Amino acid sequence: MPVIDHDDLQIHYSERGSPDGVPIVLVHGLLFSARMFHRLAEDLRGHRILLVDVRGHGSSSKPDDPAAYSWSSLAGDVRAVLDHLGIEQAVVGGLSLGANVTLAFANDTPERTAGMIVEMPVLDDGQPFARRVFTALATTLSTTAPVLGPLTRRTAKLPVPRSIPELAALRDLLSLEPRSGAALLHGLLGDHLVLEDLDADRLKMPALVIGHRGDPLHPLSDAEALVAHLPDARLDVRHTILDYRVLTRRQALLLKRFVREAGR
């Protein structure tokens, strides 16, 4: 897995698909890794797929200072990978944390964003629930670090079949280093992203926003408000969070159509 140096950290990424295809960056959810997109990347192999482990996740560096974590710094990890590869513009997307990283990347560097794929953003309506849950989780990780640390390091060494990337993604979650995980949560909780932070005049690129009902962390109302806020956005509503995790080929068809239309 290739690695680049950025902000005194190592950022890992991988490439899938065709090197001559449209570049598409995919960013994982909170505490997971890029492995959660391996199956989707296979279904998008006609494009140039870049899977990035942003800091604090997967195989990338995991600083234990909350100041190292902000939405702009995570977006900067994506930008550093594109700089390293000499890619001037890409479609950028992600799920949950990755959705917010996508919004921060486009807000900071709209000229480099050909389009956005924003699945399950956490904005104004999701913030209260996120704050309660992740504050409690950060406290738990901090206080139990002496016990959890050795266990998670052992978990990281467990073998998993390469043919089941979802198991590898789950192993990444369960092998979280407690102190860096707590730092990550504290850092992002102190830098929450809300709709008014997003400059609609800068975010004129096409956007595909994906949401679903019945989830207090990723409320559909956040996805709907984002679509209303952006100049060129469309909404795709699924039944549950599992729809596209299971039906990756269906999601791949949706993304291919979006990328094709975004390039017209």
Image (cartoon, rainbow, N blue to C red):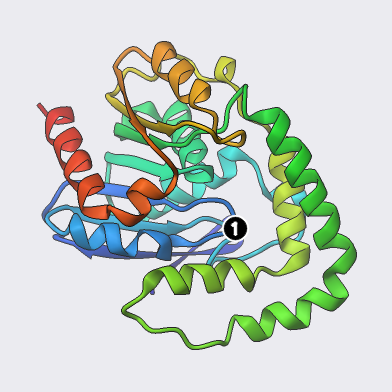
- Secondary structure at badge 1 equals loop
> The N terminus lies in which quarter of the figure?
bottom left
Residue 147: % across, % down: 85, 77
Q: Is residue 170 visible?
A: yes
List the single residue furthest toward the right: 143
Packing grade of label 1 (10 A; few <14, some 14-19, many >=20) is many
> The C terminus lies in which quarter of the figure?
top left
Residue 138: % across, % down: 79, 53
- The residue under label 1 is which amino acid type? Leu
User: Seen in the image, is 74 located left or right of residue 99?
Assistant: right
Q: In this picture, is 44 found above or below 16? A: above
User: Seen in the image, is 61 located left or right of residue 85?
Assistant: right
User: Seen in the image, is 164 located left or right of residue 216?
Assistant: left
Residue 40: % across, % down: 28, 57
What residue is drawn where x is 53% and y is 33%? 214
Q: Which residue is mark 1?
A: 31
What residue is drawn where x is 41% and y is 61%? 36
Q: In this picture, is 68 found above or below 42? A: above
What residue is drawn where x is 27% and y is 39%? 89
In terms of depth relative to the viewer, which is nearer, 133 or 38? 133
What residue is drawn where x is 86% and y is 68%? 144
User: Seen in the image, is 121 located left or right of residue 151?
Assistant: left
In terms of depth relative to the viewer, which is nearer, 122 or 20? 122
- Tell me where residue 55 sits by quadrant: bottom right
Residue 25: % across, % down: 33, 49
Q: Is residue 59 visible?
A: no
Q: In this picture, is 28 found above or below 10? A: above
- Tell me where residue 114 sits by quadrant: top left
In terms of depth relative to the viewer, which is nearer, 207 or 87? 207
